[in-house]
Amino acid sequence: MSPHLPLGPGREFDRIRRIAAKLGARARGLGDDCALIPPGLGELVSSTDLAIEDVHFRQVWLGHEEIGWRAAMGALSDLAAAGAQPVGLLAALALPATVSDDEVDRLMVGLGDAGSQVGAPVLGGDLSRGPCLALAVTGFGRAERPLSRSGAARGDGLWVTGHLGGARAALTLWSRGERPDAASRQAFARPRARIAAGRWLASHGARAMIDLSDGLAGDVRHLAAASAVGVVIQLELLPLHESVARAAGTVGEPPAAFAAKGGEDYELLVALPGAFTPAEAAECERETGVPLTRIGAVTPGSRVRLLLEATELALGGFDHFG
Amino acid sequence: MSPHLPLGPGREFDRIRRIAAKLGARARGLGDDCALIPPGLGELVSSTDLAIEDVHFRQVWLGHEEIGWRAAMGALSDLAAAGAQPVGLLAALALPATVSDDEVDRLMVGLGDAGSQVGAPVLGGDLSRGPCLALAVTGFGRAERPLSRSGAARGDGLWVTGHLGGARAALTLWSRGERPDAASRQAFARPRARIAAGRWLASHGARAMIDLSDGLAGDVRHLAAASAVGVVIQLELLPLHESVARAAGTVGEPPAAFAAKGGEDYELLVALPGAFTPAEAAECERETGVPLTRIGAVTPGSRVRLLLEATELALGGFDHFG
């Protein structure tokens, strides 16, 4: 991107010029009415995701690069769940007068870093005044056979990537006025959309996939409903983030239940044929760096059961209007 | 769209189910992590546009269907400027607790109506709590040869679609506590992205195009900068919206200057070869219903001059941070 983006005069367009200069190779083709989506093979998928101050984050918790990074990862994680390869991002920013040019630069650098980690330059966007800091990020990706939440079949195993509950651990500690440990803070501030793992799973027989943005306990119900199947999850099998034990203790919840309710880890829940083996899971980890853990199974009927040592727990996920 | 969208339980997902049921054929494939962009010929272009309460609109001015309609037209208008055929929309909504389910339905019906007017169903989106009502609409379109702001060449004529200044007339009257007349209110509340005209122009030699979202006086400077050309606009040639005379009078501006500063008309400014004739413009109007008016020319150098009866006026467009 040229630092001399050819736009007319004005503060708004100065900001766009600054952003283009800061992003460098992390952006492409900024400054026109429309973004051109790069051509390529496979179907094009897209997702749009909001990140709103005091709803999704607080400015006192995160640096501006982290706010931009998280906002991008929210949209990229949806692409991961489709098994897609990201190809670009659009970023719409609402900016209160209190946000400085330097802070806008850092927001966009964080957002651009997140995209460039996975091959998705910033292709365009929108800037506006706004009553609070808010980002709407739209991600584009390509997949030969896009996965969705439907397609899980009776007998499939249910697996998750990575470790759960880290982001909720940080949020829990912040909301109690405590300082999160470095590991949980990192889970919240610098999540990593599971692009490589999502693509590996899509090419190794995955039948249905969803990202855990609202928490396993809620998101598994979407996968079950979309696939018209029942599900049983054995919570004691959940791979817990290292920070869960302490945070769960402060709110008096069993650690696995705490992790199952925690959204924003951006891990993937995937239905794989029953014959998928631990050796194949180990291969996924070797190739993508992301562990896979079997936590349950697809069952007949439509019930979703979350069992902790054979006791059914009534847990839900995050609900914006609940 | 099935009214029985298979999602898990929760108020947020009840809202998505309601929206899908209300939208009917105006939506497709809602309820998954990603939207599938329909395949087709030509290059894929995309634009994202924010519409924020008390920045872009006030809830006391507009009905919720109108708010949704306008938000969609903002993104669709960018597709029009690329000469693209819209193929779908994503809608991200931030909703304060004061917005009712019925109001959300109406927002989405207005947005869906705008899209379905031009062949673009709602393919997905995001819902979140938020401190004010805000919409981020992303539009997708296809164009065999997407137009941009660059490409205008010395000797080209500059033309605009439709009539200018209607939306600003309504805003001016509202901001003075007066009631806009029906025509200017309509221009603000129910703009029409110039999709058919944009496509006609793209296939009849247009070299560069931009939509007038920030007003001719600002947007022409982007076209000139992107094309590395100068421009002269003869303001007395501007096709004025019928409500401009009254509103311009209330603020003591010459009507043409008033219209040149007014954004959000979502008309198109297009550079056409100098040989493009009034007869061809009449053909465009016959085929698309949209009049075309020649208002200036591309010149050597890089100066942008806005002349009113040979006197140069210093006018700019809307600047979010100006």
Image: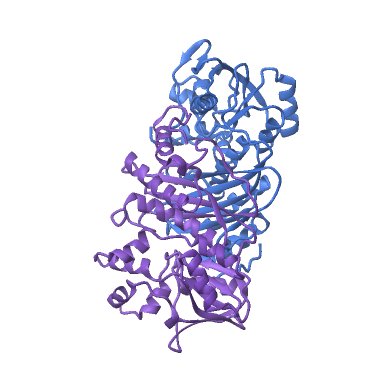
Chain colours: A purple, B blue
Instruction: Locate the C terminus of chain A and report the quarter of the image it occupies.
Output: bottom left
Would you say residue B101 is visible in this rendering?
no
Q: Vertically, is A47 above or below A321?
A: above
- For the image, the number of numbered tags is 0
Q: Quadrant of residue B200?
A: top right
- x, y percentage for residue B124? 58, 57
Q: Vertically, is B74 above or below A6?
A: below
* Residue toward you, B121 or B256: B121
Position of B222 compared to B322: left or right? right
* Residue toward you, B105 or B307: B307
Position of A249 compared to B139: left or right? left
- x, y percentage for residue A123? 52, 43
- x, y percentage for residue A46? 57, 54
Q: In which quarter of the image is residue B6?
A: bottom right
**Residue at (56% x, 65% y) in the render:** A200
* Residue toward you, A65 or B181: A65
Would you say residue A87 is visible in this rendering?
yes
Q: Vertically, is A257 above or below A32?
A: below
Position of B47 compared to B205: left or right? left
Q: Quadrant of residue A37?
A: top right
Q: Vertically, is A79 above or below A149?
A: above
